[in-house]
Amino acid sequence: LIRINMELLPHAHAIFSPWLMIVGTIQIIYAASTSPGQRNLKKRIAYSSVSHMGFILIGIASITDTGLNGAILQIISHGFIGAALFFLAGTSYDRIRLVYLDEMGGVAIPMPKIFTMFSSFSMASLALPGMSGFVAEVIVFLGIINSQKYLLMPKIAITFVMAIGMILTPIYLLSMSRQMFYGYKLFNTPNSY
């Protein structure tokens, strides 16, 4: 979208950017609202990634330098954060041979390093202030607010949807960490620690 759509076809990008904005807002709300229902750890992380890609679409569709910078920073930061979360999910699967959150529980004690890293990257993914995800999402917010293309009411609606997405993100990420690391172990699995 950035390389081809914005640079080679700027007039088409200006015409279709409101549709990109609509797709981005739908993507944020849909993925953030369906992610808590996922029992599989990797699926929940994947839905989190889909929700964060909505912020990238909104930043690209804002047609401002600030929004584009926020979208690029979100691409870079979520690339590292998402890869780390998937890596840690795979590592925890190799250790305990469980992938469903209902079956996991109490993993923080036998795997403290994975717990620490997973918690740190989860906090970065939910845009905790001071982390790169927070900076990227704030820059996207500023990009849509400073955009001259959109009227005031669509800006308010899009900012409201983005805020709802940012509120739903801790719900599914912190519940995932709670179920995985602090929950009760329901099934007896062979001790592979």
Image (cartoon, helix red, strand yellow):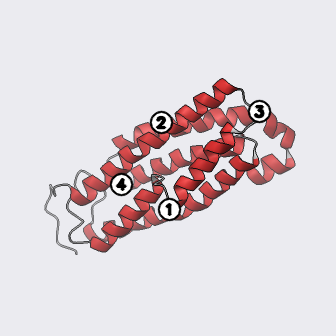
Q: Amino acid at mark 1?
A: Ile
- Give the distance between the C-alpha atoms of the residues marked 4 and 3, in whole angstroms: 39 Å
Label whose residue precedes the other's in the sequence (2 or 3):
3
Residue appearing at x 26%, y 53% in the figure: 179
**What residue is shown with label 1?**
81
Q: Amino acid at mark 4?
A: Leu
Residue appearing at x 75%, y 51% in the figure: 2
Q: In the image, which is nearer the foreground, mark 4 or mark 1? A: 1
- Tell me: 184 left or right of 119: left
- Tell me: 39 left or right of 51: left
Q: Position of residue 183 (x, y in %)?
A: 20, 55
- Give the distance between the C-alpha atoms of the residues marked 2 and 3, in whole angstroms: 23 Å
Viewer-nearest residue: 26 or 63: 63
Label whose residue precedes the other's in the sequence (4 or 3):
4
Label whose residue precedes the other's in the sequence (2 or 4):
4
The residue tagged with tag 4: helix, strand or loop? helix
**What residue is shown with label 3?**
149
Q: Position of residue 65 (x, y in %)?
A: 75, 49
The residue tagged with tag 3: helix, strand or loop? loop
- Give the distance between the C-alpha atoms of the residues marked 2 and 1, in whole angstroms: 21 Å
Label whose residue precedes the other's in the sequence (4 or 1):
4
